[in-house]
Image (cartoon, helix red, strand yellow):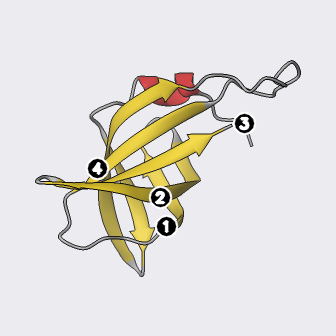
Amino acid sequence: MELLTLEHFAGCVNEPFSAALNGMDVEFVLVEARPLPPPTSAANAARAPFSLLFRNTAPVLFPQQIYPMRHARIGEVGIFLVPIAQERAGFLYQAVFN
């Protein structure tokens, strides 16, 4: 499996990802893909760290866990999502890759 980088997701901002949850497909929209500062000992890092921010408009908060997510260009990948905020439009979830 190819190591995912920020470049894989940067062109997918404002696009839906479908996550499998309890036999249902749940839509998460990627609302932000941004680089993170490299750790001080990152000389031999396999990739530059980055963060993804997803929005889900369901009225329920989904738990922090790995979600099998699908996207037309990226394919299927497990992404660990952590709920971080609630907005009028739904809940925000963050994934950090380091």
Residue 53, given in percent of the width and then of the height, sits at: 39, 41
Q: Earlier in the sequence, mark 2 or mark 4?
A: 4
Foreground mark, 2 or 4?
A: 2
* Residue type highlighted by circle 1: Gln
Quadrant of the rendered structure where residue 33 is? top left
Residue 77's place in the image compared with 10, above or below, is below
Provide the residue designation for mark 1: 64
Between 57 and 39, the one lying in front of the other is 39
Mark toward the start of the polypeptide (2 vs 3): 3
Measured from the top left, where is residue 37 in percent x and y? 62, 22
Query: Alpha carbon of mark 2 to alpha carbon of mark 4: how far?
Result: 11 Å
Residue placed under numbered mark 4 in the picture: 55
Q: Amino acid at mark 2?
A: Val
Residue receiving disc 3: 2
- SS for callout 1: loop
Q: Would you call the spot at circle 2 few (<14 residues within 10 Å), some (14-19), or many (20 or more)?
A: some
The residue at 42%/74% (across/down) is 21
Question: Do the residues under discs 2 and 1 have CB atoms within 8 angstroms?
Answer: yes
Q: Judge depth for marks 3 and 4 and give the one in front.
A: 4
- Which amino acid type corresponds to the residue marked 4 in the rendered image? Arg
- Please report contact status of discs 2 and 3: CB closer than 8 Å, yes or no: no
Label 3 sits on what residue type?
Glu
Disc 2 target residue: 82
